[in-house]
Image (cartoon, coloured by chain):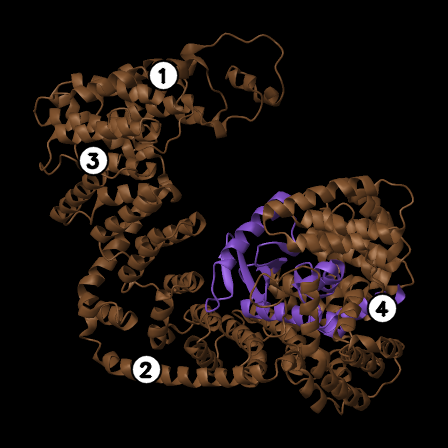
Chain colours: A purple, B brown
Amino acid sequence: MGIRFILMVNKQGQTRLAQYYEWLTVEERRALEGEIVRKCLARNEQQCSFVEHRNYKIVYRRYASLFFLVGVDNDENELAILEFIHLLVETMDRHFGNVCELDIMFHLEKAHFMLEEMVMNGSIVETSKANILSPIQLMEKAT
Amino acid sequence: MEQLKTIGRELAMGSQGGFYQSKEFLDLVKSIGEARSKAEEDRIVLGEIETLKRRVSEPDIPKRKMKEYILRLVYVEMLGHDASFGYIHAVKMTHDDSLLVKRTGYLAVTLFLNEDHDLIILIVNTIQKDLKSDNYLVVCAALNAVCKLINEETIPAVLPQVVDLLAHPKEAVRKKAIMALHRFYQKSPSSVSHLVSNFRKRLCDNDPGVMGATLCPLFELVSTDVNSYKDLVISFVSILKQVAERRLPKAYDYHQMPAPFIQIKLLKILALLGSGDKQASENMYTVVGDIFRKCDSSSNIGNAVLYECICCVSSIYPNPKLLESAADAISRFLKSDSHNLKYMGIDALGRLIKISPEIAEQHQLAVIDCLEDPDDTLKRKTFELLYKMTKSTNVEVIVDRMIDYMISINDNHYKTEIASRCVELAEQFAPSNQWFIQIMNKVFEHAGDLVNIKVAHNLMRLIAEGFGEDDDSADSQLRSSAVDSYLHILGEPKIPSVFLQLICWVLGEYGTADGKYSASYITGKLSDVAEAYSNDETVKAYAVTALMKIYAFEIAAGRKVDMLPECQSLMEQFLASHSTDLQQRAYELQAVIGLDAHAVESIMPSDASCEDIEVDKALSFLNGYIQDSIEKGAQPYIPESERSGMLNISNFRNQDHHGASSHGLKFEAYELPKQTVQSRIPPATLASTEFVPVPEPMSVRESYPTTIVPSASSDAESTELKLRLDGVQKKWGRQTHSPATSTSSSTSKKTVNGIKQVDGSNTSNSSTWETYDSRKHVEINSEKQKLAASLFGGSSKTEKKPATGHKISKPSSHMVEKSHVRKSSMEIASEKKALVHQPPDLLDFGEPTVQSSDPPSVDPFKELEGLLEPTTQLGSTAAAATNSPDIMGLFTETPGGTHNKDDSDILSSLSKQPVTNMVGGATSTQVAQSSKGPNRKDSLEKDSLVRQMGVTPSSPNPNLFKDLLG
């Protein structure tokens, strides 16, 4: 299955985007997010960008005030996931231009659309920024 | 001027590209963004829920407005509140004609509903309709929803359409159709088992995106059934080769690596296919070797691919050259300053040592460093490695470390894991029983409630069996030390239940064995335990049985038993216990105390817990009695399996009855039994008949105890006792795990324990102990010390002597490491400098090379195809189509003002106008350059906007990514 969830959480622990690839109830999500964010916030810059949590491995990366967290299975290449996060940020950056937390908040659906193009069934399916963004650009133009 | 720009930016944010947003929405997002605490956020969201409940039910909501409400619902749920009141509106929105509104509807539905939700049935129809749409973006939106919402039951409703879409002219649709099929496979493999060949076909798709996506289902298929996909090895290898040779469109490059995510997926698949298959592996050696050489080890993504190569190399049939490359890569990882790389290095090392164990040695210092690192993640990974490389020679150091770590952590999930690993290693490699018991004590003390009860039983067995029969003094020494340590541990305030059971058992068996402790001392301790843990029935049961043993040993030794007053009160309490088990034990104890020394000794011989109880399954001791009975005219017993499978009634038929009717019911009255005739029939002939007389077994059962008891040997006695006990246990459904269930005989304990396989493994286990032991005597002095020293150089000072070679090499390796560190830190510093100089460039990292190496002389995919599917002729158009998005992508770099120009370009690229690569390259350079300048300004603007809107960035950094990218 690979990727189990993708979260964007700011450093106050507020969720800014959440996409799960396996079903969890709202309560379970809330609890899980709380635990994970607490764990990741407690870590410093020198430490690994990977944290084990229950049966997940969390790969996280911090951009200014925003944390990107990806929960993966045990046999996933953590370093590749770390770069996948960066690819996601680069893609958003290409679209929004110097993307920031507010861009994601104001355009939550677009951020989700990008993720929908990049990840399906918990697997990375598209890594070309042009391919990821073209449906969104076309939609923008159509409306 | 600046102000004007800011206002423009704000407008742009509010209504970027037609994604209309109202003031209300902006205010909501703003207030959520400003919330200082979870409580404040909750208040805002609860207020929002009330607003939305009112709003969504208003009539005639414009669809723009509705879309916004749905997004606000998404916010509500994302922040942890229930938005189920609005689900139906999200479902309705999927019917909308507008693509954007529809897709937002689908998005909301996939976020809100799981596949078993009642509303799904309402969406299936819409999905079916949308899958037929002319607009491929609508089809894509529907396919996204298919992947998330279709469950096993609804698969047939969309399956035919999804299969048709696999041949859709648009690559985006084919890609998503493949993933939908993949989803169906995950949900219900049988529903698509006849369509699996489609995955193979799509592997040869013209579009690299479709090919890349197809690798996901293929990876899963290969991992479930490797052998059916061996024929694809050549295809995978050739794809990987072309990817590595940069034949894919540049759009797939990431940080100058050609399609690294596709490479990684391919390497994963190859690792599966080549595992244990020499022939398949040989096809892979060249390409994996090439990737090793080509990978840029200065970038994260390069290292990610390298890591995957190592995984692949350690999985496929070993190749010395590749193993060498892998080892080099690992040592680079381990010597790196980055914790991430160290982590990957440790993991990779764990994989490689399975094939070449000697590689661990050269990295001992790095491993020790990681083990001592304050970073928990790294530490755990290192423990995982140590677990994999544990041998009888280093087990002590490793397990000691693990236990220290286990004690230090609070996370129960990991504590359980590491405790079970300690037990496993200790059982497998223990150098001595003494050590094993110490380790087990520690594990029980600190994680007793987390370990399996079997572990305790194994330890009991070990203490009982000791080293073996040849060394009795060592055994008793072992037991004495166990008793000592347990009496000491009993002083601790809180002891896990499993550990208490173990302690009670050992004290009962061996507490008074060496004469060091008096019976009253031990019984006092035992009743303290029963008292202190009065709500744990199992512990109490163990304690009572232990008391009984102590008293029995005392009586057998001819000493007078004085029950301590606290024991007496305890017994009284137990005699009236609600637990029948405790009651029984207490009564048995009473009965045993009343017997004379001789009887007690035969019931409860001391130190007999490992004596084998011969269970005479044939019940041969009954032979004489049976013979007597048969001679008196009884019918012999016929095993159940040999009786006819007919109704029971047929078993009662008179033996004189003719065989012809034996297969039917007999309706006439039974004849009278002819006793005299029966008795003369020899047993052999009778055995072959199917008749079982009813009355005889009855009489056997009745007379059985009386006939047996007088003539019984001690063997037979215990068997007999056990038999009756079994009956009792079954009757009351008691679990048989507790040794103390034995009524009176300690010899019966092990069988009562009932774990026959334990008994079986018993012997084999003890023999392994012995072999380890003997090896220990031979090798321990030289081998163990040397390895412990070489593996754990710094930690064991006294053992350094034999490892002189290492001593010399140590400082030098340190030097090497240091110099390397210095060098790499220099590199990093220079990199950093570069970053500092022009931060806005970071995102353009990939672009310059895109331009420099852009004009490929050959159509990349034509070649790819050529290899995979020589007959395709769409090559050139496909290449044009796949290249154009890249150009388009470059155009999006232009600042927002030039949208119009942008748009026309997208259109042109979509209509597959042959934009040449050269032109694209040239424009993009310009664009890239022009976008570099204003970037910083942009970010400043955004920052000021953010402040203006009242969202004060709470960090010292403004909410900007640019300085952190890279």
Question: Up-down: is B927 above or below B184?
Answer: below
Q: Which kind of residue does numbered mark 1 sit on?
A: Val
Q: Chain of mark 1?
A: B
Q: Which kind of residue does numbered mark 2 sit on?
A: Ser
Q: Which residue in the structure is indicated by mark 3? A: B507
Disc 2 vs disc 3: which is toward the camera? 2
> Where residue B790 appears, x then y in whole percent?
27, 73
Instruction: Please report the residue visible at 34 percent of the width from the left and 63 percent of the height from the top.
Output: B390
Q: Which residue in the structure is indicated by mark 1? A: B700
Q: Does label 1 or label 2 sit earlier along the sequence? A: 1
Q: Which kind of residue does numbered mark 4 sit on?
A: Leu
> Where residue B7 appears, x then y in whole percent?
78, 68
Disc 2 vs disc 4: which is toward the camera? 4
Q: Which residue in the structure is indicated by mark 2? A: B813
Helix or strand or loop: what does disc 2 sit on? Answer: helix
Helix or strand or loop: what does disc 3 sit on? Answer: helix
